[in-house]
Amino acid sequence: MAPKPLVFVPGFPGTKLLDKASGDELFPNLLGLITPGLRNQLLARLRGPDDPDQDDGVVAGPPIDKALPLLPFVDLAGILKQAGSLYDVLKRLGYKITGASFGDRFRPVGWDWRRPVDQKDTLARLKAAIVELSAATGEKVTLLCHSTGGLVARSLLDKDATVAPLLERLIALAVPWAGTLQPLPLLAGSSGWGPVNAAQTQAALGRSWAAFDLLPPDPAKTDMTGVDLFRDAAGQPSSPLLATGWVPAGADGQAMKDRARRSDAALGARSRTLDLGGVEVVNVVGWREDTLARASVDAQGRLAFQDDPEGDGTVPRVSAAWIRGPQVHTYLVPIGRYPNDLLRRLHIVLWENQPVRDLLATHLAGRPLPPYVYAAADADDAVDVERPKIRIYIVALDPLGSPLAGAFATVAGSSTQFGVGADGAGMMLLDRGLAQNAGHGFFRFQVRFQDANGTPLGKPQALTIQGPVVL
């Protein structure tokens, strides 16, 4: 059976930017960024125009799908492997993606992340891809969005009621529905990005309209109940778009304030309810990775930041899980080590986690959804043999994302039960000690799930760690 017609919108800044006249790649032009004589010239081209709709000779290309082979050491927070790793997953589901050819059932839509998420040309090209693919296949389309790409998609659906009837489903991967603070240190000049220092990052990224669209909205205009991301100098819940004491003085600062005002006017008042007229929303939320979760500004414009593990490394869980609606189904994804998987899977490649792969296979390839029960070992505990305890994150949900009340997990060889909370998530805390030796310093143990009646849920999951555990 052919996979579902699929349109993909990447996150920020997961799209190539090209010189309109020559087609030369401006981003990710890593050679230009690491070459002192070219860096400033290139950064000037990457600054967003003061008029969001102005033609400044830079256009969006396709999503970034691979790194330059000579510069694999420059990661840029994983951006360079983003779409390529997703394409690998999609090819296993039957999509015919080869180089720049995407077959007859898949359309990637890059967008100019220097401009707002609701920029007219961006929304027009996204709508055209959906309309064309639906017409070509005679089927409704699945819209797959990662991170900021979800804000682009929502902007289109909010503005154009003719699009929703063409959609079967919206799959939202780690979308910051209620904003994220991740761009704030870069905008404030507190940190650099890849090979670009803090001042250069601020000068370039500070002119990106979409970077401001990512910041949390005004709590006075948007229902932010349970979402306290930013506080002003008086200690009150606010938005970095309003409490702008952190913005530098001068012309660059004024341009940044202009962008903040525009983002507040366009996105400051957001609806928590996402109702697309019967279109299902599969909302995927990463969990248990340190994430920039709170910030505050003082009277002198100094920012203070606080991390916590309730996120995916980029987007806080409370923001990704913020939306509600009759067709919204939210799935938590524990971030860590899965069976036979020794690699960390963060925000930028959330689809590499087994739960997300299973969700994609269910909705894109028509496979049955296995019981949504998963266990992942904490990524740091799994490799640090000096830690006396190992945290295992568990989640137990029904096929529609509702918590399985009373579900619990056990470890083979132990009678101790670890239950899940009201949100369907929980944590197992195990002591290190003897377990089944897998060789080469690795040890394995099985996690088993049962429902409130003791009926097994899914297959046992064998987790691999470095060093043993004791039950």
Image (cartoon, rainbow, N blue to C red):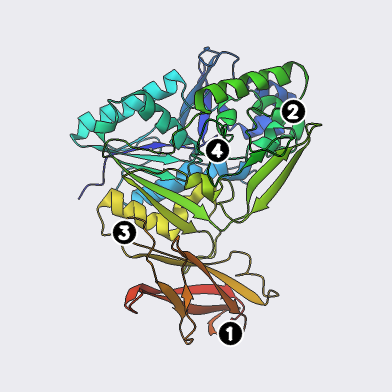
Q: Secondary structure at mark 3?
A: loop
Which residue does the numbered mark 3 point to in the structure image? 399
Q: For residue 396, which numbered disc appears in the image?
A: none
Q: Tag 1 or tag 3, which sits nearer the N-term?
A: 3
Q: Tag 1 or tag 2, which sits nearer the N-term?
A: 2
Disc 2 or disc 3, which is closer to the eye? 2
Q: Tag 4 or tag 1, which sits nearer the N-term?
A: 4
Q: Residue at x 50, y 53 (%)?
A: 286
Q: Residue furthest right?
A: 300
Q: Tag 4 or tag 3, which sits nearer the N-term?
A: 4
Distance of label 2 from label 4 (alpha carbons): 19 Å
Compared to residue 3, the image places residue 398 above or below, namely below
Q: Residue at x 74, y 25 (%)?
A: 37
* Circle 3/circle 1 CB separation < 8 Å: no
Which residue does the numbered mark 2 point to in the structure image? 245
Disc 2 or disc 1, which is closer to the eye? 2
Compared to residue 60, the image places residue 100 above or below, namely below
Which residue does the numbered mark 4 point to in the structure image? 179
Which residue does the numbered mark 1 point to in the structure image? 470
Distance of label 1 from label 4 (alpha carbons): 41 Å
Q: Amino acid at mark 2?
A: Gly
